[in-house]
Image (spheres, rainbow, N blue to C red):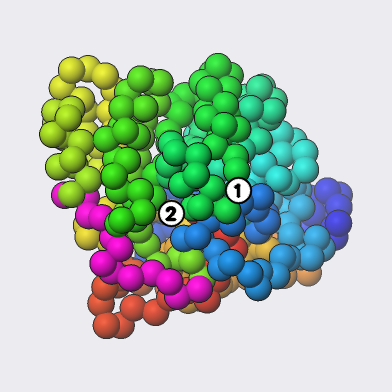
Amino acid sequence: MIGSLGSLMGATTTTTEAARPLVDSFGRVHRDLRISVTDRCNFRCTYCMPVEGMTWLPREEVLTFEEVERIARLLVERHGVNSIRLTGGEPTVRAHLPVLVGKLAALPVDLSLTTNGATLAAVAPDLAAAGLRRVNVSLDSLRPERFEELTRRDELSNVLAGIEAAVAAGLSPVKVNVVVLREVNDDEIVDLARYGRDRGVTIRFIEFMPLDGGGAWRPDQVVTQAEILGRIEAAFPLEPLARGHAPAERFRYLDGAGEVGVIPSVTRPFCDQCDRIRLTADGQLRSCLFSLDDHDLRTVVRSGGSDDDLSDAIEACVGSKWAGHAINQVQFVRPRRSMSQIGG
């Protein structure tokens, strides 16, 4: 591993100053940080990465826990970030993940994690004990054969066990993310909504986005928010809740059995309210999931850069953020990295 805690701490000497909110040219204030801890994954989901040709990052190119902590602490203490989500790849394949959770839990943030859930049953108690507050689990089908087709792994039983373990460990809320693809799993929308109601977890349906890295996305595969809600409401009447800065539009079941969310990234994008930035596993800061540019924080950290140097790089990244991702518009260009390489 490159760098040591001592050298990292030695590079952070700087003057104390008031918080400098991260405001882009459109007036959006950025307080939500997504941190990818690895590009590796134990699944091969069809909408996330190509079937073959993935080249994993060498270990020495991945940020150490100390490097992640330094960048996160700067963003929290100097720039007002108050929410951190750990992602991947699949974050639970990163060795000793509870150690990093413990470091970040010491910061005044809402700390959460997104996982495919396959190994969650084994690690949920340790993650909760280390300070993790809540978790999102990906689950695109309740049917074993279909689940295996989508993920290229026979792991449905382990994912369902992981969701139960997260609830038992006190992680709350437990949210379940479902990417909906037309004529693939859209016939399970009501079944998945019912599963969430019965288990006391929040289902969040996600419109299919072009993030597979292999060019397979087509607009006609998108099942829209209107369609998703129409199917749910026919079985379980709903009423809308306030959205705020969250990507999901939220709806309450009228019978009191919890809520459901839809992330309409394609048909009703929330770009004008977006408040998040993303740190990839190799230390590149991105202002948008669909950004075409990376801002290299790893080099700043490993070359002995000061906190002021880091802040300058972070502010340059946020300052260059565009108005929106432009999916379905002629000027849209896919990011060169797949979802697993960026971090969800």
Badge 2 is on which residue? Answer: 276
Mark 1, other Cα within 10 Å: few <14 / some 14–19 / many ≥20 = some
CA gap between label 2 and label 1 equals: 31 Å
Residue at 66 percent of width and 35 percent of height:
119
The quarter in which the N terminus is drawn is bottom right
Q: Is residue 169 above or below residue 80?
A: above
Q: Is residue 332 above or below residue 262?
A: below
Q: Amino acid at mark 1?
A: Arg
Q: Position of residue 306 (x, y in %)?
A: 70, 62
Q: Which mark is residue 265?
A: none
Q: Nearer the viewer, residue 254 or 36?
A: 254
Answer whether residue 217 is magenta in the image: yes
Residue 39 falls in which quadrant of the image?
bottom right
Q: Earlier in the sequence, mark 2 or mark 1?
A: 1
Residue at 22 percent of width and 60 percent of height:
267
Q: In the image, which residues are magenta?
A: 214-226
Q: Which mark is residue 153?
A: 1
Residue at 39 percent of width and 44 percent of height:
178
Q: Position of residue 343 (x, y in %)?
A: 55, 56
Residue 10 falls in which quadrant of the image?
bottom right
Q: Nearer the viewer, mark 2 or mark 1?
A: 1
Residue at 57 percent of width and 26 percent of height:
161
Q: Secondary structure at mark 1?
A: loop
Q: Amino acid at mark 2?
A: Arg
> Is residue 143 in view from this perspective?
yes
